[in-house]
Image (tube, rainbow, N blue to C red):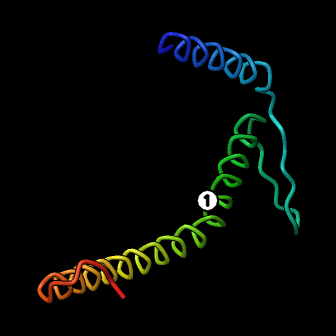
């Protein structure tokens, strides 16, 4: 299975390398107020791909931090409940009761 994954990675790399070699033409990116930027097409595609990934990660970070905070609160509540239930078990055993009322 490990070899299949490496083979898939190599094939994907070769396909992307071919894509880069085919799209190395210079392009001009026009901004506002007459500003322009001239570079290769693949560099612009890579830049916008990286910006898209960054925006996606930033959009998800809020949810991740909220879930971590919620998990920490739930773990704290669970440990408190476990601590109190063990105290109740000790109290019942010391009184000679086998079951809870």
- Secondary structure under badge 1? helix
Q: Give the answer, above or below, for where 6 lies relative to 100.
A: above
- Above or below, 90 against 42 in this view is below
Image spot of residue 61 (x, y percent): 57, 67
Task: Classify residue 46 by image quadrant.
Answer: top right
In the image: residue 68, left or right of residue 38: left
Q: Position of residue 55 (x, y in %)?
A: 67, 61
Residue lying at 36% horizontally and 88% vertically, measured from the top left: 101
Decide which of 55, 37 is in the foreground and name it.
55
Residue located 25% across and 81% down the image: 83
Relative height, residue 24 to residue 10 (above, below): below
Which is nearer the eye, 4 or 12? 4
Number of callouts: 1
* Picture residue at 68% right of the left edge, 54% below the top: 51
Nearer to me, 47 or 66: 66
Which residue is pictured at 21% across the width and 84% down the height?
Answer: 97
Q: Which quadrant would residue 22 be assigned to in this image?
A: top right
Q: In which quarter of the image is residue 92?
A: bottom left
Q: Which of 67 and 35 is in front in this view?
A: 67
Q: Does residue 71 appear left or right of residue 97 in this picture? A: right
Point out residue 91 in the picture as x, y percentages from the top left corner: 17, 88
Left-right relation of 63 to 46 = left
Q: Would residue 59 be found to the left or right of residue 61 on screen? A: right
How packed mark 1 is, by other alpha carbons closer than 10 Å (few <14, some 14-19, many 20 or more), is few
Label 1: which residue? 57
Q: Is residue 85 above or below residue 50?
A: below
Q: Residue 2: horizontal and vertical position, in percent?
A: 47, 15
């Amino acid at each position: 299975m490990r070899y299949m994954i490496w083979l898939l990675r190599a094939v994907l790399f070769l396909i992307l390398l071919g894509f880069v070699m085919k799209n190395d033409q210079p392009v001009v990116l026009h901004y506002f107020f007459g500003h322009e930027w001239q570079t290769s097409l693949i560099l612009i595609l890579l830049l916008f791909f990286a910006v898209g990934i960054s925006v996606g990660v930033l959009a998800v970070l809020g949810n991740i931090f909220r879930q971590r905070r919620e998990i920490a609160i739930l773990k704290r509540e669970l440990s408190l409940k476990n601590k109190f239930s063990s105290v109740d078990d000790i109290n019942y055993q010391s009184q000679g009761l086998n079951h809870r009322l």
